[in-house]
Amino acid sequence: RTLLWFRCQKLSDHGITADNTCSQRNLGLQCVNPQGHVIPGGMKHGDFFPLCTNNTHVTHPWETYPEIEQQPDTCGASLWEDFSDPEDYDHKVDLTRVNGTKTMLFWSIVGDEGAKKMKARIAFNNTFGWLAVGFADVDDSVHNGMNGANIIMSIPGGNYSAATGLDLEADPSVGTYKINPTDSSFRHWQNPIESDETKTTVANFEHTECFTDITFESDHINGQKFNFEGTDEMIWGGNHLDHFVGYHGREHRARFTVDWNTGDVLFFGEEKEVETTAKNGGTHEDDDGRDHGTDKSNDGSVKNSVLGLSTSFVFATVVHYLYGN
C-alpha cells in the first residue's frame, strides 16, 4: 500500500505486486494523475494513483488546468436575477455555501395523485464546467453521499479523456449518471445511465458566458423515486474552473435534506436553526449571513424557505452519520 490522494491505495490494484515491482523494471514508484504529473508524497486532492514511471515531480510537475473565467463586468446582478427568475415554480431554496457561487434550487410537484412528478431547476451563478444534482447515497460515509449517488449532470462537451478533458467541439449534454461506489473520479463513471433513446427523465440545460442551469421533470433518477410526501437527502455540485470534470471544492457542493412540500432544507451536519421569522413574513439570517425569505405569499410569488426540520429528524441523521456506517 501507499499513501496518495490522502488515503492508502493498494498497489496490487494498479498492477504493482511483489513479483512485478517498480524497481524490477528500473522505474520509480510515483503518485501521478492521468496527465502524468507527479505529486511528491501524494498529498493533493485529485485523480491520483500509483504508477511505475520515470516521471518525477521535477520532470513532470503538477500543473493547473486551463481555467474558464466569468467576466464580472458583463455578468452583473441584474442578469443573474433575470436568469434565476423562479416564476414557474412553487418553491425555491438557496443552496449557496460559504464563499461559494450563488446557487438556487426551484421546484414544483406536478401531476395527479399516483402520477406525480418533480419539476425542478438548479441555477448556478457561474460558467459551465459541469453541474449536477441528485440523490445522496446515504450509505456512503467517505464522500458525503457522493459515491454511489444517482444524479442528473450536464457537461459542456463530449469524448471525455481523463488526460485531455472534454472535447469542446463535441455537443454538450445532460444525462443521468450513477457515481462509482468507490472511485469518485469521473473516468470511472463517465457513461450516462440513460441514453436519448431510453431516457425516462426529461432533462435540459442552459448556459451562457455567465450562468448555468439544469431543468428536469421526472418521478425518479435512475429508478430511485422522489418521496413526494416527505423528505429526500440530496447532493449538488458544480465546477466553473475547467473542462476536466474534476474537483468542485467545498464551496461548490452540498449535501442536504429537503422537505418537498414545505420547502424546509437542512444541510448535512448542521443542527436545527432557530426560527426568527415574524408571523406576517420577513426574513432571518443564518450563521454565514445569507438572507433567507419565508414561505410563499398569497399572490403566488416565491420566497426562500430555509427553516429547520424537526429535532428528531436531525438527531436521527446525526446518529446515522456517526454510527450507521
Image (cartoon, helix red, strand yellow):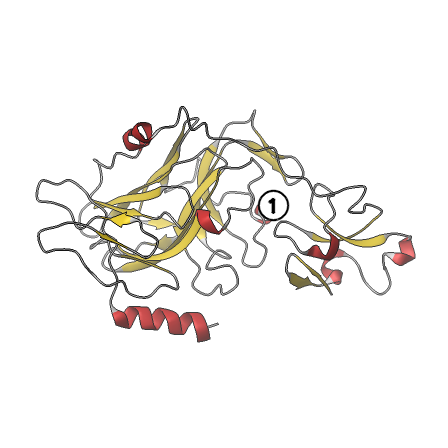
Q: Quick check: 279 left or right of 200?
A: left
Residue 142 visible within the image:
yes
Q: Is residue 173 above or below residue 42?
A: above
The residue under the point 28% across, 32% down is 81
Mark 1 surroundings within 10 Å by alpha-carbon count, few (fewer than 14), some (14 through 19), many (20 or more): some
Q: x and y percent of residue 63 in the render?
A: 68, 40
Residue 85 image-quadrant placement: top left
Which of 241 and 165 lies nearest the eye of the viewer?
Answer: 241
Q: x and y percent of residue 58 in the render?
A: 80, 44
Which of 188 and 269 lies nearest the eye of the viewer?
Answer: 269
Q: x and y percent of residue 145 in the render?
A: 46, 59
Which of 240 and 18 lies nearest the eye of the viewer?
Answer: 240
Residue 222 visible within the image:
no
Which residue in the structure is indicated by mark 1?
A: 187
Residue 18 image-quadrant placement: bottom right
Q: Is residue 244 above or below residue 145?
A: above
Q: Quick check: 171 left or right of 9?
A: left
The residue under the point 31% across, 47% down is 94
Name the amino acid, label 1: Arg
Q: x and y percent of residue 128 in the render?
A: 47, 33
The quarter of the image holding the N terminus is bottom right
Q: Is mark 1 on a helix, strand or loop?
A: helix
The number of numbered badges drawn on the structure is: 1
Which of 100 and 120 lies nearest the eye of the viewer?
Answer: 100
Q: Quick check: 169 left or right of 285?
A: right
